[in-house]
Amino acid sequence: MQNRNNINRIDALRADTTLPAEDLRALLLSMTQEDEEYLYRNAREVREQYYGKDVYLRGLIEFSSYCRNDCYYCGIRRSNEKAQRYHLTKAQILECTDTGYALGFRTFVLQSGEDLSYSTEEICDIVRAIRAQHPDCAVTLSIGEKTRAEYEAYYDAGAQRYLLRQETSNPGHYGKLHPPELSIENRKRCLQDLKEIGYQVGCGIMVGSPWQTPDNVIEDLCYMKALQPQMIGIGPFIHHKDTPFRNMPDGTLTDTIHLLGILRLMFPDVLLPATTALGTIHPLGREKGILAGANVVMPNLSPKGVRAKYMLYDGKICTGDEAAECRRCMERRIESTGYHVVVSRGDHPNFR
Ligand code: SAM
Ligand code: FES
């Protein structure tokens, strides 16, 4: 049965994209199945106003599994001695982008742990080489917390987008997920620097991370409202057997798509991925994400031989497929939802 109050809240959110915290709390906690269907229908209508039926592809290249950080949730954290480490050379990364280009990718996302073996100049050199080889493509970096000068150098080299999830904007909660040397203040400083430099910025959280409360999620929504990111990446927290959070419960499909729907109404033109973690938690997770308002997918372009080594959480999907298989599989999945993938850079509307 529909809850009239929730329907009114969904209508209000669609009309002006902000709601008092108590209404957001009610939307997070008290939706019936019919309310959720109403939310997703509205989310789809809003995404279609901005993006039609298009779904953008990002080719994800996980180029290093080394990390100096020790985030308690993450499978490639420094202290995980069982993690298999690798890093790709510039030539290997360029092979991935060449393969990706032939498959119709026009955005490459270079992601890694915080691997200090690549100097700033080496990262810039890789970015420049990709932009020179494929001038019609965008390069996105997702390589963690850096100085403003480093972010400026990458931008000058041709990187135009940066993904850095805040993970949680509440300092107390942040402290439960990370060791003391990491701070939410520095994470937010990074996001602010990235925005000021002119990047298209992606932030985001893990849904259902250990000790996350509805109030934490509301705080994240408020933080993101103030930041105005161009992309918001969310996916369920999934435990990894060799981390301190091995026994923690995973985030759920329902909570993740629920939040995707709310995000679409609060941030009508934002780029919103249906993530790999969502596809890991449920075989049709990414399709359900698309039907809840997401408009981006990120198939894996990493060389087949290293994929299983970038194991952020248990059961991560798509670790055994070639790039071409992943691309075809994704196309079929998206078409099954009534949407379609497009060959496009897929910039945010304000950056076209
Ligand atoms: N080092 C970069 C950084 O910290 O932003 C990028 C790599 S990091 C592995 C990318 C994202 O993976 C993180 O922002 C985090 O949200 C996600 N992640 C890590 N461990 C996870 C887990 N156990 N479950 C779900 N997502 C996870
Ligand atoms: Fe560094 Fe996860 S702890 S990437």
Image (cartoon, rainbow, N blue to C red):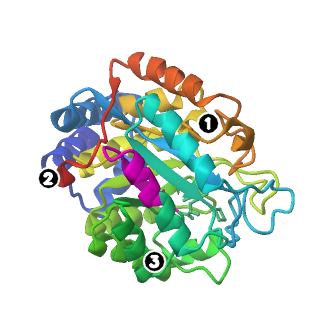
Whether ligand 1 has any atom under 8 Å from the Cβ at mark 3 is answered as: no
Q: Nearer the viewer, residue 239 or 134?
A: 134
Question: For the point 33% across and 64% down, which residue is it?
Answer: 224
Identify the residue position indicated by label 3 in the image. 150
Label 2 sits on what residue type?
Answer: Asp
Q: Nearer the viewer, residue 209 or 178?
A: 178
Q: Nearer the viewer, residue 145 or 177?
A: 145
Q: Can you give x and y, in whole percent of width and height, for residue 134 in the image?
A: 38, 44
Query: Closer to the N terminus: mark 2 or mark 1?
Result: 2
Q: Quadrant of ligand 1?
A: bottom right
Q: Can you give x and y, in whole percent of width and height, for residue 137 in the image?
A: 35, 45
Identify the residue position indicated by label 1 in the image. 281
Query: Alpha-carbon neighbours of circle 2 within 10 Å: few (<14), some, or many (≥20)?
Result: few
Count the marks.
3
| Structural distance between the alpha carbons of marks 2 and 1 | 32 Å
> Which of labels 1 and 3 is toward the front?
3
Label 1 sits on what residue type?
Answer: Ile
Query: Closer to the N terminus: mark 2 or mark 3?
Result: 2
Identify the residue position indicated by label 2 in the image. 16
Kindly state the secondary structure of the residue where label 2 is placed. helix
Q: Are marks 1 and 3 in contact (CB under 8 Å)?
A: no
Magenta span covers which residues?
127-142
Residue 268 appears left or right of 335 = left
Query: Alpha-carbon neighbours of circle 1 within 10 Å: few (<14), some, or many (≥20)?
Result: many
Question: For the point 62% across and 47% down, which residue is it?
Answer: 92
Q: Is residue 138 magenta?
A: yes
Whether residue 342 is visible, yes or no, is: yes
